[in-house]
Amino acid sequence: MTAESLPVPGDEDYLAEMHLHIGARLARQEHRYTSGRRQLVEVLAQANQPMTLPDIVAADPDLAQSSAYRNLDVLVRSGVIRRLSAGGDHTHFELAEPLLGHHHHLICIRCGSIEDIHLGSDVEILVDQSLSDIASQTGFTPIHHSLDLHGHCADC
Amino acid sequence: MTAESLPVPGDEDYLAEMHLHIGARLARQEHRYTSGRRQLVEVLAQANQPMTLPDIVAADPDLAQSSAYRNLDVLVRSGVIRRLSAGGDHTHFELAEPLLGHHHHLICIRCGSIEDIHLGSDVEILVDQSLSDIASQTGFTPIHHSLDLHGHCADC
DNA sequence: CTTGCAAATGACACTCATTCCCAAATATTG
DNA sequence: CAATATTTGGGAATGAGTGTCATTTGCAAG
């Protein structure tokens, strides 16, 4: 999908290459890729599902809450991480699409959990085309779309 | 789309009929359709775009903040109003789809505004089918989907 | 049209997710 | 190493949203 040759999750040193990409991206914006930020990215990469701040801190208790929030914000602004507002108490965070691939979500409206799903490319193409048609009529500049299915997860 | 014969927005006494529908729906759940709730619905019906609580109170200063929040919640639980989490400071509310029709949103990631859009039925059908295919494989029970386009609005 | 009772109201206190603050620590540059 | 800039983390502050409770309102039965 992207012109850059990103390694895929099955890759041997997927994490190492990903860190290089992210470090370069942060450097371009005069930000340092510190260990705290690296830990954040690793937690999200290993979970491969959107996480809340309590999830993240539980997964790596070395992370300080205030720094985690601040660094999540830096990474969101740099396009490394994406912020999801699912309606529960906490915002969810996940790696951005260039790192994770384009996908959508199953959102449980009872327990607030979020799971990733992938749609067929035929659907994606049609959706993208329809949305950009509408956007251009309104003077809206599209950046990305979100398509989520809300309902009850298997556990609920 | 629905079996019931709801009046359409062009209708003479659209509001009156809508209030009847909502009153009946609330009564079924042992709730009263009080003047505060009616005002809430009228504000949202007239704005025909999702509003935050400050928007709502500004549009009708008679509404008390705590009651407005409580009644919004009652109306959400009763399926009259839908809650949207757009990522800004405030949650947005809009009339639910049975009253407003199925639609999607343009969400400005700079100013937080939300605007309604409608997609062609071919897109809707394809999306619906794809989503329910995936859901059934996962044991997820779909209730509704949301498809939003994020970007910059014409004003930003 | 009272009386009784459950639901609703609104002012205000409170919770808690997130942001702000700032002095100490760490990295970068010359 | 000195000088400068960014980052860190603990705790205080912010503010959207919720809870509390005494008062009011709406409805039903007599």
Image: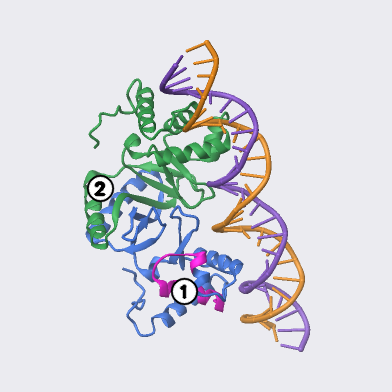
Chain colours: A blue, B green, C orange, D purple
In the picture shown, does residue A120 fall above or below B9?
Answer: below
In the picture shown, does residue B33 fall above or below B109?
Answer: above
Type of amino acid under label 2:
Glu
**Is B9 part of what is drawn in magenta?**
no
Q: Decide which of B18, B124 is in the foreground and name it.
A: B18
Q: In the displayed structure, does residue B47 sit left or right of residue B127?
A: right
Residue A149 in view (yes/no): no
Q: Which residues are magenta?
A: A33-55
Secondary element type, mark 2: helix
Q: Decide which of A73, A107 is in the foreground and name it.
A: A107
Chain for mark 1? A
Q: Residue at x 25, y 36 (%)?
A: B2
Tally of marks: 2
Q: Gap between marks 1 and 2, in whole Å? A: 36 Å
Q: Quadrant of the C terminus of chain A?
A: bottom left
Q: In the displayed structure, does residue A100 sit left or right of residue A25?
A: left
Residue A71 position within the rendered picture, expressed as x and y whole percent measured from the top left? 56, 68
Secondary element type, mark 1: helix
Residue named by callout 2: B124
Residue C9 position within the rendered picture, expressed as x and y whole percent measured from the top left? 55, 30
Type of amino acid under label 1:
Val
Residue C7 position within the rendered picture, expressed as x and y whole percent measured from the top left? 47, 32
Residue A89 position within the rendered picture, expressed as x and y whole percent measured from the top left? 50, 55
Q: Residues within 10 Å of mark 2 (few under 14, many from 20)?
A: some
In the picture shown, does residue A43 fall above or below A117?
Answer: below
Residue named by callout 1: A43
Q: Nearer the viewer, mark 1 or mark 2?
A: 1
